[in-house]
Amino acid sequence: MPLRVRVCRIADVPVGEIRAFTVRGVTWPVIVVYVDGELVAVPGVCPHEDVALADGYLDGQAIICPAHAYRFDLHTGRCRHDAGLELRRYPITVIGDEIWVDLL
């Protein structure tokens, strides 16, 4: 059974910017970004070394980790530098103007 949580409003996510939102009971924030017009939600931590991805930057359809410049494709979650790493994508549901994310 999914754990669906309200993360933010659509207006809280500007196009071309990384936004991280604190979710009660979750250690790392949830990042929500627009990628090619699609809302994407991912964990706010790099799977390589627990670095805050909110401090990174967007490059096209990828998020770049600020610590070691690992590049994660936001459409697939795949890491360009290490095929063994993947950034999880959370399913999103938009209800009215709110963004809800399934964490499990």
Image (cartoon, grey):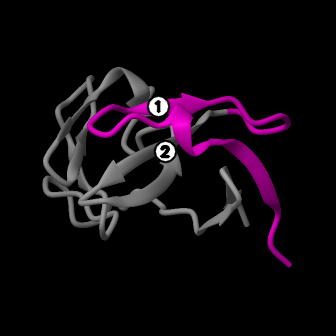
Query: Left or right: 38 with respect to 78?
Result: right
Q: Quadrant of the N terminus?
A: bottom right
| For residue 93, side relative to residue 81 (left or right) | right
Q: Position of residue 58 (x, y in %)?
A: 22, 37
Q: Kindly tell me whether residue 6 is visible in this rendering.
A: yes
Looking at the image, residue 100 sits to the left or right of residue 47; the answer is: right
| Residue contact at pointers 1 and 2, CB within 8 angstroms | yes
Q: Report the residue marked by disc 1.
A: 19
Q: State how far apart marks 1 and 2 are (Cα).
A: 6 Å
For the point 17% across and 33% down, which residue is it? 69
Residue 75: quadrant of the picture: bottom left
| Residue 88 lies in the magenta-colored region | no
Residue at mark 2: 32
- Mark 1 is surrounded, within 10 Å at the Cα level, by few (under 14), some (14 to 19) or many (20 or more) other residues, namely many
**Residue in the foreground of this view, choosing between 10 and 83:** 10
Report the front residue among 68 and 99.
Answer: 99
Query: Under tag 2, what secondary structure?
Result: strand
Give, as a three-letter code, the residue at label 1: Arg
- The image quarter containing residue 9 is top right
Q: Which residues are magenta?
A: 1-27
**Farthest residue toward the bottom?**
1
Secondary structure beneath label 1: strand
Query: Image quarter for residue 91?
Result: bottom right
Q: Amino acid at mark 2?
A: Val
State the residue at coordinates (22%, 66%). Answer: 83
Mark 1 vs 2, N-terminal side: 1
- Residue 63 vs 101, above or below: the answer is above
